[in-house]
Image (tube, helix red, strand yellow):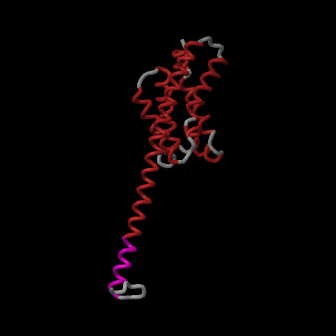
Amino acid sequence: MLDEYLSEKRDAVVTEWYDRVTSQSPPETAKFLREQAEPFANPVGAGLREELGPLYDAVVTGNNVDRVDRALDRLIRVWAVQDLKPSEALAFLVELKRLIRARVASDGLECGAELAELDDRIDGVLLAALDVYSRCREEIFDIRVKDVRNRSLKMMERLNDWRARRDEVGGPGAAEPH
């Protein structure tokens, strides 16, 4: 019964979910996310528009785990780069649970066991999302460490080149012969 209800309400729920997720951003960002439809100008908004629907479908049906992973990776990768806390980056899944519960209550549906089962699926997706967020943050830190290492190596190479040139010309501070 709940699955049928959520399938019927899919477009309305996904639209409201998108609005709630974007409204959690600062006002100017939220406006941009909603109004800028060009994917290259607004990759976050495009990702939300393209991935929330399939993610909703997978959560409601409990099927298509690969689709869940792909959607989570695309959504969370952007938020991980923005240096959001995990609670901020993953709040969109908690928001889905709240939204569904509010709709079910407002329509007077009695589906406690099915709702508990759906909550468990959302919680499972939330835990998977935490893994994705952690993996993305690790990748970012690895990139930063490699960048610092590469800059340090280049600086050492320049310093060694400078020392070699200085020693060749016997300039100030050149090594004294022993």
* Position of 99 relative to 41 (above/below): above
Quarter residue 5 falls in: top right
Q: Nearer the viewer, residue 159 or 72?
A: 159
Horizontal and vertical percent position of residue 153: 38, 65
At 52% from the left and 16% from the top, the residue drawn is 3
Please tell me whether residue 172 is drawn above or below residue 132 in the rendered image: below
Please name the predominant secondary structure of the magenta segment in the image. Answer: helix
Q: Residue at x 49, y 28 (%)?
A: 125
List x then y, in percent, for residue 97: 59, 25
Q: Quadrant of residue 163?
A: bottom left
In the image, 4 versus 155, the foreground residue is 155
Q: Which residues are magenta?
A: 157-169
Q: Residue furthest front?
A: 178
Q: Is residue 7 magenta?
A: no
Quadrant (top left/top right/bottom left/bottom right) for the N terminus = top right
Image quadrant assignment for residue 172: bottom left
Residue at coordinates 48% horizontally, 29% vertically from top-left?
55
Q: How many marks?
A: 0
- On the image, the x and y values in percent for residue 18 come to 57, 34
Task: Determine if the magenta segment contains residue 160.
Answer: yes
Location of residue 143 with respect to 16 vertically, above or below: below
Q: Position of residue 30 (x, y in %)?
A: 61, 43
Q: Quadrant of the C terminus?
A: bottom left
The structure residue drawn at horizontal position 46% and vertical position 49%, both measured from the top left corner, is 140
